[in-house]
Amino acid sequence: MPLSPDHRDDAAPVAGLDGATFGYGERAVLADVTLGVRRGEIVGVVGPNGSGKSTLVKGLLGLCDRLAGTVTLFGQPAEELRDRARVGYVPQRHTLSGSVRATAEEIVATGRLPRLGWLGRLGATDRQAVARALEVVGLADRAGAEVSTLSGGQQRRVLIARALAGEPEVLVMDEPMAGVDPASQHVLADVLERLLARGATMLIVTHELGALERLLTRIVAVDAGRIVFDDT
């Protein structure tokens, strides 16, 4: 977890943007973006507030309007991808709501929804995937704890585990380090390092490069709605 299919083509981008412009309604936020993410890469997306970082990942995932250009996932137009579970998404969220009355395990189990059959019930395979996801993020011992009792860093790991439960091939994260203390940032970085060792591919929007620096293979800098740097 994440999956690493035997038939993969490591030379081809698993996620690609070509001349893409994204926005909301007719208002463009990110213009003429070309970007490719290949298997095994850990790409950090950085830039000032309001530069278009979150819009970049939302555009890749089809969560905002595409005004121009193309988006591909696994070598096909993104709109034609039927197995959406191949891409895991950790949205920008500092914590889970304190009013949520659910255990960590129950939250993570919702990540299996794209994989469930027509009955919509968790089977043994699903429960195993949930348990593995909690183990990867170091929360196996807190599976039965209500999320409202967990720290901010632990709640962030629950959200990562929820994405992992769907067994994605690519993991997209929007500000996973934001709002957590330095110690928790390093714990999260250790989690991502374990995923890297399993062959994960990640696209991470972040302001907090310090804890991630040892993991990133590339940095993409966004400013004023355009990519201004893309290199190691």
Image (spheres, rainbow, N blue to C red):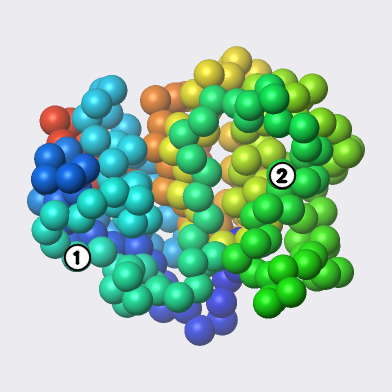
Within 10 Å of disc 1 (Cα), the crowding (few <14, some 14-19, many 20+) is some
Is 41 situated left or right of 230 in this image? right
**First-in-chain label (1 vs 2):** 1
Up-down: is 30 above or below 63?
A: above
Q: In which quarter of the image is the C terminus?
A: top left
Q: Is residue 13 visible?
A: no
Circle 1: residue type:
Thr
Residue placed most toward the observer, 11 or 48: 48
Of 95 and 170, which appears nearest the observer?
95
- Cβ–Cβ under 8 Å for marks 1 and 2: no
Residue located at (78% from left, 37% from top) = 102
Looking at the picture, how far across and down is residue 44, in whole percent?
A: 38, 40
The structure residue drawn at horizontal position 20% and vertical position 55%, both measured from the top left corner, is: 66
Secondary element type, mark 2 = helix
Q: Is residue 221 depicted above or below 182 in this figure? A: below
Q: How far across and down, in percent of the image, does residue 14 sit?
A: 38, 67
- Determine whether 40 is above or below 204 in the image: below
Nearest the eye: 176 or 219: 176
The residue to which callout 1 is attached is: 70
Q: Is mark 1 on a helix, strand or loop?
A: strand
- The Cα atoms of the two marked residues, 1 and 2, are separated by 33 Å
Q: In this view, does 176 lie to the left or right of 73?
A: right
> Where does residue 4 sit, x and y in percent of width and height?
58, 71
Seen at 45% across and 75% down, the residue is 82
Residue 107's disc number: 2
